[in-house]
Image (cartoon, grey):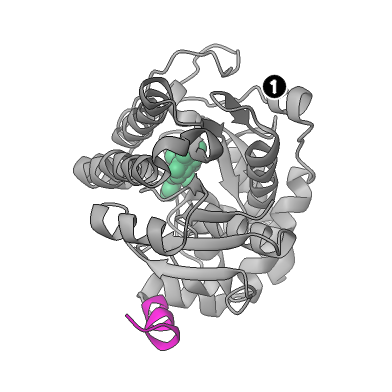
Amino acid sequence: MSKNILITGGAGFIGSHVVKLFVEKYPDYQIINLDALTYAGNLENLKEVENSPNYTFVKVDIQDAEKLDEVFKTHQITDVIHLAAESHVDRSISDPLAFVKTNVFGTVNLLNAAKKAWAEKLDEHLFYHVSTDEVYGSLHDGGFFLETTAYDPQSPYSASKAASDHFVRVYANTYKMRTVISNCSNNYGPNHFPEKLIPLCINNIKNMKPLPVYGKGENVRDWLFVKDHARAIDTVFHKGNAGETYNIGGFNEWKNIDIVRLLCQKMDEKLGRPSGTSEKLITFVKDRAGHDLRYAIDATKIQKELGWEPSLQFEEGIEITIDWYLANQDWLDHVTSGAYQDYYASHYTE
Ligand SMILES: Cc1cn([C@H]2C[C@H](O)[C@@H](COP(=O)(O)OP(=O)(O)O[C@H]3O[C@H](C)C(=O)[C@H](O)[C@H]3O)O2)c(=O)[nH]c1=O
């Protein structure tokens, strides 16, 4: 069946992989990518699909309710996959309100726009919220996050995502909107903004700059290749049951310090530097305030019920990721200097 799917945050890291997958895999769907193009949204991520007949870009901030109404009307939106969000925990610690505005207020705006546009036929449409495992808080002694784990957010970022998850569920309960939520672990891969651990380290190793490891580097994250997350979103969108939550993860836990050492070793090999050169860049710095110790996802439900599982081993995914950053210096230059904004100006008119 033909659909007009609104994907929010489609110029961002995870969003751009989702947009590319949907545009290429589903030529019968119209994909409307709605993005505010903040510092982390870059249309260069979408070069491969920007001229596809089933792809449209609209520059809109989800805080703008009027524009959202217009987009739903103009493009006759049938379904939403909502990824637009402020995502960096460190930024949320210095500016919590920015996260409330986009992640909470923006999500409620979007829910309202969908509710209004879909009116009496709410049961014919789907609102899919893409969320994070951080809503479950921090694990201190073994165990995994299950879909039934109680929410216990510990940072302004995770509190804002938890609030937006709650609002999505409330719209299902109160207004009978068909909704689905997935909560995913840490992603890595091409197009990741170099403020996050893996791309930041790759970029700094390349430039022989210090690698800031928070605290002792003992914190644990579960890493998933971004294209596997995009495949999971495709699976949940098409096969997931309305009203359900699906945890997505790689069963791939790493201590931060081990990841950083692995990147140093691989980069030394690739750059032809003597072994041990990059490790000297490791610098232990002040810990993140309220730093969550460990995230670990139990992804059994999505594997068993929907048949999704990660396709890439971590070693393979990291190779692809490093090679991508080494081959895409222009992309790095553009996102770090702000010049990526020129791409929008030269390709689109307001
Ligand atoms: C940037 C940076 C990070 N770290 C540590 C902090 C974390 O323990 C780990 C990963 O940090 P990062 O900021 O890359 O990602 P998380 O804070 O785990 O959060 C990420 O994964 C979840 C699921 C989301 O939902 C977030 O949106 C996403 O940003 O490395 C350092 O030690 N040094 C650094 O310079």
Residues 90 and 101: in front is 101
Vertical relation: 313 (above or below) 220 = below
Residues 267 and 245: in front is 245
Residues 200 and 158: in front is 158
Q: Quadrant of residue 298?
A: top right
x, y (%) of residue 235?
Answer: 70, 40
In this rendering, would 266 be left or right of 344?
A: right
In this rendering, would 310 be left or right of 177?
A: right
Stretch in magenta: 340-350
> Where is the C terminus found, in terms of image quarters?
bottom left
Residue visible at 76% across and 35% down? 308
Query: In the image as oriented, which residue stretches furthest toward the bottom?
Result: 346
Question: Which residue matches tag 1?
Answer: 301
In this rendering, would 9 be left or right of 234?
A: left
Query: In the image as oriented, which residue stretches furthest toward the front?
Result: 120
x, y (%) of residue 99?
Answer: 28, 43
Chief secondary structure of the magenta portion = helix
Residue visible at 22% across and 44% down? 94
**In the rendered structure, does residue 349 fall within the stretch colored magenta?**
yes
